[in-house]
Amino acid sequence: MILYSIDIGLSGGISKFVNGVYQYSIDMPVDKIEVKKAKYKLDLLNGKKQFYKSGSQKGQPKMKQISPAEYRTELNLFKIMDIFKESDSKYEKIFVILESPAKSIGNSARTTATTNRNFGKLLATAELSGADFDSVVPNKWKKDLSLTKDKKECVEFAEKEFGITFRTKGGRLLDGQAESALIGKWFINFYNK
């Protein structure tokens, strides 16, 4: 059986297990989507247009940016679907375990809405891929593994458990990858037991 365990946040992760053996973890595939274009106006000098005099824009009017473009980060569902389907022909059963959104005390309404929207998208992607799936709330899997909400504690536990580092070269914690791997460990050790 192939198991994909997912920490659903935009900075979350996806981990893969084959027959209960850890394979890898990756950052959640995301894309930046432009939701508002940058605004420009003519660069005027004494009320006259200015033009480029050389280079690739020669003859073009000079423009000043008056407001920057705005972007939103969204899940890349096509990459996620490709991950789920990469193993279709090799093994019979694919199972996806998702971390379901917990009560979001302290989070903004926008953050809560984004998390819930991502959860719905991931559920739909799992179903469309033909995989079996279920979800677990964070306090359940963390309690069963004797962990707290502390991200550093989760990363250190995952590093001991899987024998790899869940940190960047600069030392930043890759808590999304670590937590997705721990969700997989929870599934293997505690699901339906």
Image (cartoon, rainbow, N blue to C red):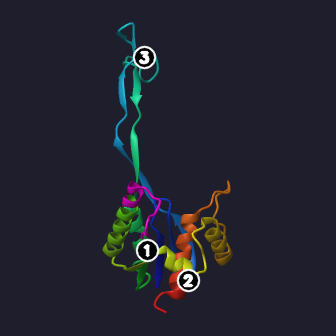
Distance of label 2 from label 1 (alpha carbons): 16 Å
Q: Is residue 107 above or below residue 155?
A: above
Look at the image and give the residue range highlighted in magenta: 101-113
Q: Which residue is mark 2?
A: 144
Secondary structure beneath label 2: helix
Secondary structure beneath label 1: strand
Q: Main secondary structure of the magenta part?
A: loop
Q: Which mark is residue 56?
A: none
Q: Is residue 84 above or below residue 20?
A: above
User: Residue lying furthest bottom in this view?
Assistant: 193
Secondary structure beneath label 3: loop
Q: Which residue is mark 1?
A: 98
Upstream in sequence: badge 1 or badge 3 = 3
Q: Does residue 86 appear left or right of residue 146 in this picture? A: left
Closer to the camera in the image, 78 or 74: 74
Q: Which mark is residue 52?
A: 3
Task: State the image coordinates of residue 82 (x, y, percent, origin top left).
Answer: 40, 67
